[in-house]
Amino acid sequence: MSVNLPVLYEPGLSASDMEALRTAVEALERQSFAGRITRLTGRQMGIPVPAEVHRVAMDAAQRALSTSLKFALASLEGPPKGDTTRFHKRLAAVAGGVGGAVGLASLPFELPVSTTIMLRSIADIARNEGENLRHPETGLACLEVFALGGHSDDNVLEGGYLAVRGLLAKSVSDATRYVAGRGLAQDSAPAIVRLLAQLSSRFGVVVSQKAAAQAVPLLGALSGAAINLAFTEHFQTLARGHFAIRRLERIYDPVTVRALYARIAREEGYWDAPPAT
């Protein structure tokens, strides 16, 4: 009796999983949020963002993630509802339209709503990649997505996605152990505070870019809806890449997956190639 075995490509990865890895690298490395906004508006994003916009955005980002942390660990689980990304994008566009009409003053109120909407969508993407939403570690991995997009096109952190995950690894691990043992009775616990600070510092970069774009008098509320739609699509794209990588790391040796990720990122020009020896 013949047995059909998967065709392997590279050390241990099937051809389909190797293609999934390439797609994930593109999702995680190809374009920043600033690049999306430039394409949407036809204007180059102004970097640096005005100081007042940056201050409001960073504060709003931390508050939004603090609120979303409770949601991520308490109420992400539920029956599968199919592909809800379009539904969540529509909700985010409505929230962004309100923010665009009111202006920067609305950001502390609009951002937690938009972030929670995005988190629900990210959780659905995670579940579709085989994640168990009952596990605290999965909820924190959903929040981790908000830290993955905090760079501009001309200032990409060397090592990209893998470098960000490396920077966050200890904080995510510490927070996971704390929540697994004690729940989220105290969100002021050092492990939780440290993780939120790291997440919000990177998420705040993208929020600042979003706020600066919405402050430009293009189309009023309509521009706010379009920018929030791009904002949501940006993090949905990152989530698809992130949870595809996590799925592959559950199947194969994570060291192998990450080594292949780095090779693809360099081959495609997302990272600088190492100097010849």
Image: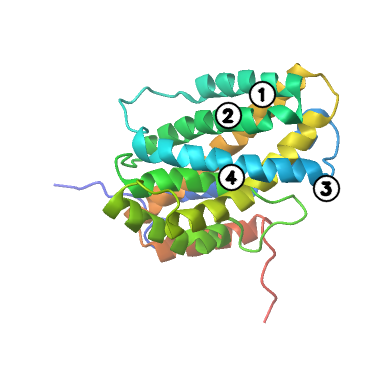
Q: Secondary structure at mark 4?
A: helix
Q: Is residue 10 visible?
A: no
Q: CA distance from mark 1 to mark 2?
A: 8 Å
**Three-letter code, disc 4:** Gln
- Upstream in the sequence, badge 1 or badge 4? 4
Disc number for residue 47 = 3
Decide: few, some or many residues near mark 4? Use Cα within 10 Å; few <14, some 14-19, many ≥20: many
Residue sitting nearer the eye, 165 or 60? 60
Q: CA distance from mark 1 to mark 4?
A: 18 Å
Give me the residue at 42% from left, 55% from top.
189
Give me the residue at 56% from left, 32% from top.
112
Q: Is residue 232 above or below residue 100?
A: below
Q: Which residue is mark 2?
A: 114
Q: Secondary structure at mark 3?
A: loop
In x, y percent, where is residue 153? 75, 50
- Upstream in the sequence, badge 2 or badge 3? 3
- Upstream in the sequence, badge 4 or badge 3? 3
User: Disc 1 vs disc 2: Cβ atoms closer than 8 Å?
Assistant: yes
- Upstream in the sequence, badge 1 or badge 2? 1
In x, y percent, where is residue 111? 61, 32
Q: Tell me which corner region of the image, top left, top right, bottom left or bottom right, holds residue 274.
A: bottom right
Give me the residue at 56% from left, 44% from top.
146
Q: Secondary structure at mark 2?
A: helix
**Three-letter code, disc 3:** Ile
- Upstream in the sequence, badge 1 or badge 3? 3
Q: Which residue is mark 1?
A: 96
Q: CA distance from mark 1 to mark 3?
A: 22 Å
In x, y percent, where is residue 131? 34, 42
In x, y percent, where is residue 209? 74, 40
